[in-house]
Image (cartoon, grey):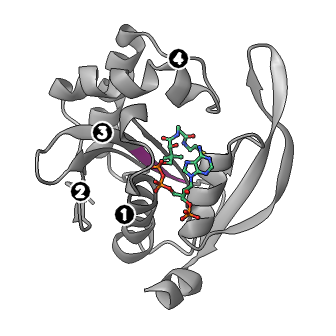
């Protein structure tokens, strides 16, 4: 599916363009935004490569990755990055992730973003199961996924290596029937 266009009350998901590098860098290059993510803050050059890869993967056939801009509808300002990646080893399953620029936190945009991504996954892509893994210390992510109705399923032990140390991931998931019931 290309291009993706989904909107909620205040936000929209759209495809990334090469003009988005600085706005994505304001998230992926930020120490606070990446504190609980699986990687250290990215350089601007690395973000440029991520955006370029995302643009290329958007038109791949079949499309297995949806790396998207989260924008405020009123201003079209990019405030977040969301991603759904189809799992090649699971039928109609995908993993997802999301991050917003820190100055926008606490206004309900996180929940709106998670719902937009789940809506894309279940309604447009026909997925059966969408899951995300978070750091055990990432309370904001835990609350946001719980608020969206995702179920905490358990722990993947020593799932992520960051700064030379292994870190567990806590799995939150939603099934298509749970999404349908939450609508
Ligand atoms: C996770 C993230 C997207 C949340 O965004 P947000 O816009 O602040 O979230 P919302 O305002 O929609 O809040 C959603 C819920 O999380 C709670 N929450 C948000 N930040 C919180 C924090 N720092 N500590 C505790 N709870 C928090 C809110 O109270 C709300 O819960 P409620 O519905 O029970 O009141 C944002 O913190 C972020 O981008 N973090 C960095 C990247 C990241 O960790 N991504 C997730 C990877 S697994």
Label 3: which residue? 79
Residue 164 percent location from the top left of the image: 80, 13
**Cα distance, mark 2 to mark 4?**
25 Å
49 to 95, vertically: above or below: above
Left or right: where 175 falls relative to 6: right
Residue, far left: 75
Is mark 3 in CB contact (under 8 Å) with mark 4?
no
Quarter that holds the N terminus: bottom left
Disc 4 is placed on an element classified as loop
- Neighbour class for label 2 at 10 Å: few (<14), some, many (≥20)? many
Residue 109 percent location from the top left of the image: 38, 54
Residue, far right: 157
Quarter that holds the C terminus: bottom left
- Neighbour class for label 3 at 10 Å: few (<14), some, many (≥20)? many
- Neighbour class for label 1 at 10 Å: few (<14), some, many (≥20)? some
Label 1: which residue? 116
151 to 183, vertically: above or below: above
- 7, 60: nearer the viewer: 7
Is mark 1 in CB contact (under 8 Å) with mark 2?
yes
């Amino acid at each position: 599916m290309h291009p993706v266009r989904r909107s909620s009350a205040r936000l929209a998901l759209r495809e990334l363009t090469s003009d988005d590098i600085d706005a994505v860098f304001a998230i992926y290059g930020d120490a606070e935004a990446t504190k609980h993510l699986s990687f250290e803050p990215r350089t601007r050059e690395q973000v440029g490569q991520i955006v370029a890869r995302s643009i290329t993967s958007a038109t791949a056939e079949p499309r297995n990755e949806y790396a998207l801009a989260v924008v405020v509808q009123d201003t079209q300002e990019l405030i977040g990055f969301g991603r759904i990646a189809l799992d090649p080893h699971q039928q109609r399953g995908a993993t997802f992730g999301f991050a917003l620029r820190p100055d926008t936190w606490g206004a309900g945009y996180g929940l709106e973003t998670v719902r937009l991504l789940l809506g894309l996954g279940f309604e447009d892509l026909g997925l059966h199961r969408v899951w995300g893994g978070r750091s055990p210390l990432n309370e904001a992510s835990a609350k946001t996924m719980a608020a969206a109705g995702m179920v905490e399923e358990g722990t993947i032990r020593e799932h992520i290596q960051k700064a030379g140390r292994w870190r567990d991931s806590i799995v939150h998931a939603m099934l298509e029937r749970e999404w349908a019931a939450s609508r």
